[in-house]
Image: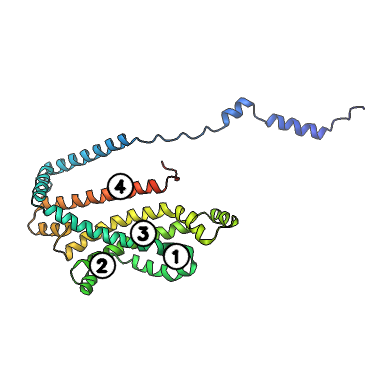
Amino acid sequence: MPDLPADPLLESVAASERRRAPLPAVAAAATPAPPRRRRQLSRTGALALNLLSAVVGVLIWWALEAAGLNLPTPWAVVKDAGHLLANGTLEQDALASLRRVLIGFCLGCALAVPVGFLMGWYPVARALIEPWVQFFRTIPPLALIPLAVVLFGIDETPKILVIFLAAFLSCVIAAFQGVISVDRTLINAARVLGAGDLTIFRRVVVPASMPYILVGMRVGLGSSWATVVAAELIAAQQGLGFRMQSAELYYDLPTIFVGFITIGILGLLMDRILLVAERRLTVWQERR
């Protein structure tokens, strides 16, 4: 069979494509290298940096006091803390504040999670509840302390109530945001496989929302500690905030420093516990 004459147009197109095709070496060089993974810090290295940061903070504190700023020396604060520990005052005040924070924080988070899930899963519940949540979010819980004292007196109820509100309002928004951020593809895939609403909620929505919930709990924990101190400044007979207010009357700066350092340590320890829980409950989440 005789060869057919080549089509000039096809030959021209083929030649053009050959000219534009990159050489293998050039193509390999042009291929972007995979991104290098950032080296993660070991636990020992992270702990060493934490200790270094604490030492630097104490040195800065000492330098500010030596420069003439009206601050107590770190050694004076340590001596005062030892005295308060020896007579049991610091332990009693810390336990009183810790008890109030734990009760209000746990109650607030326990209610915030189901309410946030309802708001995110059911549009009717969102329309009914979200305006009230946003309304009370604009009102600082501290502004409700005088009203709570008038309504419930100066016992534990008003303090726990304002802590409850601070934790609830921080956590409910996080739970709500977690539900509405769930990938719809996962929900649709579960429905195709025959899963009902309860199974989807338990197996898809709750695990996907867990990082948001735990972040909201950490934010709520900080709000709870800030609120309890303010509540104890107004109406309390025991607690770290009460002790700081009493020290203010006598210009006792070391005791004031002992109070807020104790609050910071307790808050940091509780936050680390929540961080460990977050890592255990969200092992599937990629971290840097």
Q: Which of the two labelled residues, at mark 1 and mark 4, occupies the earlier sequence position?
A: 1
Indicate the secondary structure of the residue bearing disc 2. Answer: helix
Element at label 1? helix
**Nearer to us in this view, 76 or 18:** 76
Instruction: Give the residue at x 15% y 56%.
Output: 93
Total labels: the figure holds 4
Going from the N terminus, do you reach mark 3 or mark 1 first?
1
C-alpha span from label 3 to label 1: 13 Å
Q: Nearer the viewer, mark 3 or mark 2?
A: 3
Whole-number angstrom distance, CA of label 3 to CA of label 4: 17 Å
Q: Which residue is mark 3?
A: 171
Pointer 3 local density, CA inside 10 Å: few below 14, some 14–19, many at least 20:
many
Name the spot of residue 158 as percent of width and height, x first.
23, 68
User: Mark 3 belongs to which amino acid?
Assistant: Cys
The image shows residue 285 at horizontal and vertical percentages of 44, 45
Q: Are marks 1 and 2 in contact (CB under 8 Å)?
A: no
